[in-house]
Image (cartoon, grey):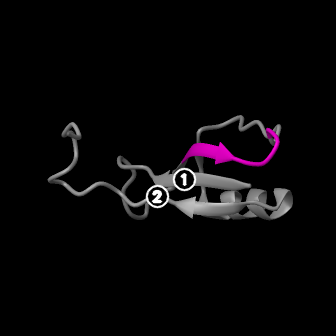
Amino acid sequence: MKIYVRERQKVGEGVKQPRFRVMALVGEDNPKVKFLASHYRKTELEQMAKEIGAEIIYLEPASESEHGKMKD
């Protein structure tokens, strides 16, 4: 099972808010995992992944030149 996450864009350094957002959950045979929040701290994600045997995939942010443009 894999959990895809990305860093939130509107959270600054040193702010005591969750930095990561879960984007997708992929697993074999429909994993039946339900997330009740949309923003998580890194330690929370790591603990959940360990408990369900999942791998966390951190998505790379889009560059400023690509941000907001449509793909051809």
Instruction: Answer with the quarter of the image where residue 36 lies.
Output: top right
Where residue 59 appears, as percent x and y from the top left, is 46, 58
| 59 magenta-colored | no
Where residue 34 appears, as percent x and y from the top left, is 76, 36
Residues 62 and 15: in front is 62
* Three-letter residue code for mark 2: Leu
Residue placed at 22% from the left, 46% from the top? 67
Residues 40 and 3: in front is 3
**Residue span colored magenta:** 22-30
In the rendered structure, the answer to whether residue 60 lies left or right of residue 36 reads left
Residue 68: assigned label: none
Where residue 25 appears, as percent x and y from the top left, is 66, 45
Whether the residues at callouts 2 and 1 have beta carbons within 8 Å, the answer is yes
In the rendered structure, the answer to whether residue 44 lies left or right of residue 16 reads right
Element assignment for label 2: loop
In the rendered structure, the answer to whether residue 12 lies left or right of residue 67 reads right
Q: CA distance from mark 2 to mark 1?
A: 6 Å
* Three-letter residue code for mark 1: Val
Quadrant for the N terminus in the image: bottom right
Residue placed at 82% from the left, 42% from the top? 29
Q: Spot the residue most to the front.
A: 72
- Neighbor class of circle 2 (other Cα within 10 Å; few <14, some 14-19, many 20+) is few
Q: Which residue is mark 2?
A: 59
Q: Is residue 19 in sight in this rendering?
A: no
| 25 magenta-colored | yes
Residue placed at 78% from the left, 48% from the top? 28
Residue 5: assigned label: 1
